[in-house]
Amino acid sequence: MSDTNVLIIREFLVADGDFVSGSELAEQIGVSRVSVWSYMEKLKAQGFDFEAVRSKGYRLTKVPEQLNQALIQARLQHAADKFQAIVLDEVDSTNSEAERLIANGQEAPFVVISRLQSIGRGRLGRVWHSPQNGNLYASFGFRPQISPSQMSLFTLWMGINICECINSICRVNCQVKWPNDLHIEGKKVAGILTEARMEADQVLSAVLGLGLNVNSDGSDWPEGLKALATSLRQSSGQSFDINKLVSAITGRIAIAYKQLSDGSHRAALKERWPRYDTLAGKTITLIQGESRISGVAKGIDSSGSLIIERDDGTRFLARAGEVTIEKKS
Ligand code: BTN
């Protein structure tokens, strides 16, 4: 990807719909006016458009609807300049790709996004259905300085931050269903798959994979999924600009990651978790392999374990597992 493309788009984003003169643009970026024009012609081929007015310069009139690496990177330079964005047409799994990139020395943090995944992976060895349907398949790669015991908090903390970002942009009420799902009104809108490479008591790298149903109308989902899943479009009645959304989420993740690195996430998670806890006060069953534990969900403890209060008043702390919510009779 050309950095010049990113710089040009960034100048237009900063102008926020106003005209930018060709000479100013050339000066800011450090290339000739002819060269700016030729970059803009190439951007047009990617779905951008510009209005040219003599004596005023150029104005950005259209951005691509499809995922666009330069546009995402240009937006990121506001909030998360250290994050590198990598956009692919197709990949087996963005989590697998992120792991390969880390193994090959890719600088972290970064985000790898694909228009479709041929072998999208879910939790517990499940498949994550990933056609090219306007949904988001993204993996965020980190080399965090944390211990393995902090990984549960890592996912929960990122989960509430993603919810907050989605809620403010899409005007929905997204919450976390412990440990890894995001729900809107009882239906799953996103799943998170966190995978880490550990050595002794150190996390060497972590990949947080996010599958977020954005613009799908659900018609291409498997039958069994339709009653359980939703998309941002289905829940809000509107479609969303995927480039804007993924840039905002990445910006938010960048801030959340800084808080995780300086330890300020602990107090913030404790304070904010009750607002985003979709299980709070509900009668649930936790499934861990063959065992079943039923009771009322009572929030999380300081390590991110789910607190389940059984009928006899005793408390069970769940570090992992799958939760089903009892239907009200
Ligand atoms: C789950 O709910 O089971 C977690 C699903 C996680 C899916 C995302 S899509 C992007 C990333 N790449 C993958 O292969 N999986 C995650």
Image (tube, rainbow, N blue to C red):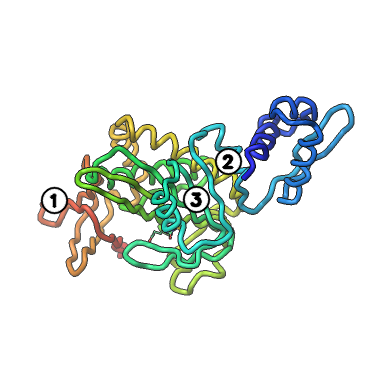
Pointer 2 residue? 73
Q: Within 10 Å of the Cα at label 3, are there few (<14), some (14-19), or many (20+) other Cα atoms?
A: many
Q: Earlier in the sequence, mark 3 or mark 2?
A: 2
Q: Within 10 Å of the Cα at label 1, are there few (<14), some (14-19), or many (20+) other Cα atoms?
A: some
Q: Earlier in the sequence, mark 1 or mark 2?
A: 2
- Give the camera-side residue of 237 and 37: 37
Query: Helix, strand or loop at disc 3?
Result: strand
* Lateral position of residue 286 relative to residue 24, left or right: left
Q: Are marks 1 and 3 in contact (CB under 8 Å)?
A: no
Pointer 1 residue? 315
Percent from the top left, x then y, of residue 150? 25, 43
Distance from mark 3 CB to nearest ligand 1 atom below 8 Å: no
| Alpha carbons under labels 3 and 2: distance apart | 11 Å
User: Which mark's residue is nearer the viewer, 1 or 2?
Assistant: 2
| Alpha carbons under labels 1 and 2: distance apart | 46 Å
Q: Is residue 296 above or below residue 23?
A: below
Q: Image quarter for residue 132?
A: bottom right
- Give the camera-side residue of 32 and 47: 32
* Lateral position of residue 315 relative to residue 112, left or right: left
- What's the residue at 49%, 38% (across, down)? 251
Q: Image quarter for residue 275?
A: top left
Percent from the top left, x then y, of residue 262? 32, 29
What label sits on residue 112 in the rendered view? 3
Please name the amino acid that badge 3 sits on: Val
Please name the amino acid that badge 1 sits on: Arg
Percent from the top left, x then y, of residue 273? 32, 41
